[in-house]
Image: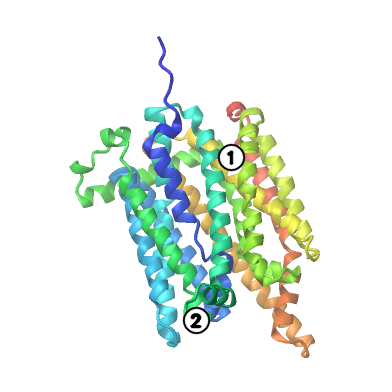
Amino acid sequence: METESKSPFAISNIRLFIAFRIFFTARFYYPIFTILFLDFGLSLEQFALLNVAWAASIVVFEVPSGALADIVGRRNLLVTTGILMVIEMTILCFVPLGNPELLFTLFLLNRVIGGAAEAAASGADEALAYDSLKEEGDINDWGRVLNLRMRLQSIAFIVAMSLGAAVYDPALMQRIADFIGLNVNLHQSITLRFPLYLSLGMAVMTLIAALKMREVSVLKDSNPVEKRSCGKAVIDAARITLQAGLWILKTPFALALILAGLVFDNIIRMVMTLSSQYFRVIQIPEALFGIIGSGLFMMGLFIPPLALKLVNHKTPVFNLGLIALITFLGLWGMMYTIPLFGLIPMLLLFGVMFMCDFFLSHYLNRITSSEQRATVLSFKGLSFNLAYGAVGILYALLLAKMKLKIESTEHTRVLEEINDAVFIDALAWFPGYFLVTFSVLILFTCWSLRGNADYKSLG
């Protein structure tokens, strides 16, 4: 007599995985990310360098952390993530103003630690949750887990985006303080830390969620931590990293999945990074940035159920073609920077980001073994961040070239007008860049998957 499998949400690690993702990713300073750095006293050039340092830190730590997760335990890596996030946010909360050199140094430290935290979490949390479901429930319920996780994460983003932008506004905070009778004088140098204080609270909750997790027996049985010295763990991590890398290269569908993900991720993540500048160009008032950001993340409430139906009833090829078409339409629509209505293409691109995240998690976990799951997922994160860093450098070079051209021919424009003009001109390159990279992906995928039809049955 068959026993009914346990509900995925009755599994402690599944609930804690969802909580961990929410606390780790929903940060209150996201809606004013670029402005925050500038208001601290950093220049645009320093901001760009800090983003490069963040991406480089992730690249350096990404795969080693995934391999160590498969060796010393996914829970241990997640606890490390929580500790690093607390340190990362504490630096921003208490960094002193007025000393440019010290300010940049501390922000650089913040970005490196933040990148290390991203790398430590990448792959480990999802691998732990998936193997917990495999051990205590039914892996066919993974789609339901992703559905709920993404929807709750979207709600958390909506709250964080709205509240983060609100508490950053000194005028609004002053009116609230006056209304409740507080005798304080709030200005930007004070309120700019309010979203950071809230994010520090999320960091503490991230650490608590990680501490409450437990290691799954499949990992404890095959990789007993207590029998490994530090040196042995490092050697085993290097071995598993090599094995996982070779497995990806020898598994055409896994390689195609990772390459497809980075083709979409790098261009859409760049668009998301530039969203505040785009909102300004399409004449969205800055006071509405947080509300608009919240509205975009509402896509996460509706996309996961659709993505679940697509992976259950459509082939990976169909799903790839669908998100490719939507991505091109979104990038093409952004070129025209239509006031207000320019939000529609941005909405399309946010939808693709949610679908791509769902598809990759569904397909990649299905074909990856437990003992190297975190490492393979870390390779995915590594490739994404390498591609994001590369497109960031290309974008910076493109901006520099366009800015020099405009400055040499239009001396009467003020700096803000020049920056907007350069940004608008640069948007015209995005659809072409995507078409080129996607075409290369299609050619490579058709070549590597020739004669292999197994992927068509994945659902």
Residue 324, x across and y down, in percent: 70, 46
- Tell me which label, 2 or 1, sits earlier in the chain: 2
Position of residue 280 relative to residue 84, above or below, is below
Q: Which of the 4 image quarters holds residue 313?
A: top right
Q: Which residue is mark 1?
A: 359
Residue 51 visible, this orientation: yes
Residue 18, x across and y down, in percent: 45, 44
Numbered circle sitting on residue 57: none
Which amino acid, mark 1? Phe
The residue sitting at the bottom extreme is 412
Q: Residue at x 56, y 79 (%)?
A: 45
Of 356 and 201, nearer the camera is 201
Which amino acid, mark 2? Ser
Q: Which residue is mark 2?
A: 189
Q: Residue at x 65, y 64 (%)?
A: 275
Q: Secondary structure at mark 2?
A: helix
Which quadrant of the figure contains the N terminus? top left
Is disc 1 surrounded by few (<14), some (14 to 19) or many (20+) residues within 10 Å?
Answer: many
Of 319 and 302, nearer the camera is 302
